[in-house]
């Protein structure tokens, strides 16, 4: 038995890529379907055995130390992960079968094929997401060619049987390898597996059966959508080829932020600032909601960071817009950093009243609060 390294024409320090390249080159040279010389098949088997051993690090190590005897006479199939060269060899031979130009320069005709789904990213306003809206968009997609009605053939003509496969759509190829004889059934490279060819393609679509167009669509955005919501528009993706069904259009929504409102599920969250006097005495103020400006009552004695609720002023539930969430309003109480002389005098007078009479007489001081507010 010849030395495996000599068979492959590589040095004993060759790496895996070098081994693979050497094997592929020699396998092509001595493959029985290519080389009809006497002894070529035996040489091909020897090359395969050499690569089987040297291509596996474990068997290569045993061969390096003990030679052929270290392999124990075993010649099992190599692991599929180590058959890169062998698999590449099959690919090389079968990809060339039929060859370029096997279709005689005629346009290939594919069988019925479903159109691709399309994605369209759409940015909408905060209010549009809350209450929904019908919106017009323009999408580029493939539509069935009106000239040939999707057949790909010039009007008045049609497909003919493929001469390569005789209309079967498949070809068979038998080849001998170091591991036995294999027969492979593959899609006909000339007709793409349909068994037919278009001899006279449609000029409008160059035989493809579809054309790229921009289409206007009106889509309905339901109330309650949010960023990440995906809307499916059936049948508005790319047209199917050769009579296949169209794909779908998926509209992915992104919602712009609101300057004063933010969303947490069905709840709207906002903040409001009030003076310390409004917090103590209570007041009615205007606040922003998704429905517009509305009145909010600040109860007497509202504490800093209190959360007030506006019921049914939140987000409609997607799929059931009658059900709505609430709006939660966090109250920030602003304390003055400077007081006028009049304000300071009134505050000191108020403090002395509290100190002298106790909290049970605080109603006598309502006039002081009114004077601080500038009211009677």
Image: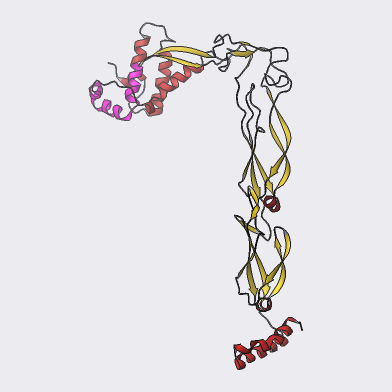
Front position in the image: 260 or 70: 260
Classify residue 33 by image quadrant: top left
Please state which of residues 174 and 10 is positioned toward the viewer in this rendering: 174
Taking the spot 33% from the left edge, 16% from the top edge, the residue there is 46
Q: Is residue 47 visible?
A: yes
In the displayed structure, 279 sits above or below 17; it is below
Q: Locate residue 67 relative to residue 333 in the image: left or right.
A: left
Q: Position of residue 288 (x, y in %)?
A: 71, 62
Q: What segment is highlighted magenta in the picture?
A: 46-73
Where is 178 relative to 283, above or below?
above
Determine which quarter of the picture holds residue 240.
Answer: top right
- Main SS category, magenta section: helix
Q: Residue furthest front?
A: 322
Q: Is residue 105 visible?
A: no
- Left or right of residue 198: residue 39: left
Quadrant location of the C terminus in the rendered image: bottom right
- Image coordinates of residue 160 in percent, x first then y, are 63, 10
Q: Residue 301 at what x, y percent from top left?
A: 63, 77
The residue at the point 72 percent across, 58 percent down is 291
Is residue 66 inside the magenta stretch?
yes
Assess whether residue 359 is covered by the magenta stretch: no
């Amino acid at each position: 038995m010849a030395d495996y390294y000599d068979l492959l024409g590589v040095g004993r320090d060759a790496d895996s890529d070098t081994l693979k390249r050497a094997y592929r080159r020699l396998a092509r040279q001595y493959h029985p379907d290519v080389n009809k010389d006497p002894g070529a098949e035996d040489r091909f088997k020897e090359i395969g055995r050499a690569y089987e051993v040297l291509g596996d690090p474990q068997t290569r190590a045993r061969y390096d130390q003990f030679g052929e005897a270290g392999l124990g006479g075993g010649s099992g199939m190599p692991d599929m992960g180590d058959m890169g060269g062998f698999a590449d060899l099959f690919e090389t031979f079968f990809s060339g079968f039929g060859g370029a130009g096997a279709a005689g320069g005629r346009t290939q005709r594919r069988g019925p094929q479903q159109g691709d789904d399309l994605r369209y990213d759409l940015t909408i306003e905060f209010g549009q997401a809350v209450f929904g809206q019908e919106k017009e968009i323009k999408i580029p997609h493939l539509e069935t060619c009106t000239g040939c009605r999707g057949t790909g053939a010039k009007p008045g003509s049609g497909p003919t049987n493929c001469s390569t496969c005789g209309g079967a759509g498949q070809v068979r190829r038998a080849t001998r390898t170091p591991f036995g004889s294999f027969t492979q059934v593959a899609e006909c490279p000339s007709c793409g597996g349909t068994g037919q060819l278009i001899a006279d393609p449609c000029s409008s679509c160059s035989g493809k059966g579809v054309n790229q167009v921009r289409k206007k669509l009106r889509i309905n955005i339901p109330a309650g959508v949010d960023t990440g919501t995906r809307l499916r528009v059936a049948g508005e993706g790319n047209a199917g080829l050769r009579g296949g069904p169209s794909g779908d259009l998926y509209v992915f929504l992104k919602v712009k932020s609101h300057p004063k409102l933010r969303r947490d599920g069905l709840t709207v969250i906002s903040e409001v600032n009030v003076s310390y006097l409004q917090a103590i005495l209570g007041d009615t103020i205007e606040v922003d909601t998704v429905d517009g400006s509305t009145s909010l009552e600040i109860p007497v004695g509202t504490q800093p960071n209190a959360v007030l609720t506006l019921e049914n002023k939140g987000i409609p539930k997607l799929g059931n817009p009658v059900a709505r969430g609430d709006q939660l309003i966090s109250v920030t109480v602003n304390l003055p950093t400077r007081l006028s002389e009049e304000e300071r005098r009134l505050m000191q007078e108020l403090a002395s009243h509290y100190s002298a009479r106790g909290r049970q007489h605080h109603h006598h001081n309502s006039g002081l609060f009114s004077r601080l507010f500038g009211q009677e």
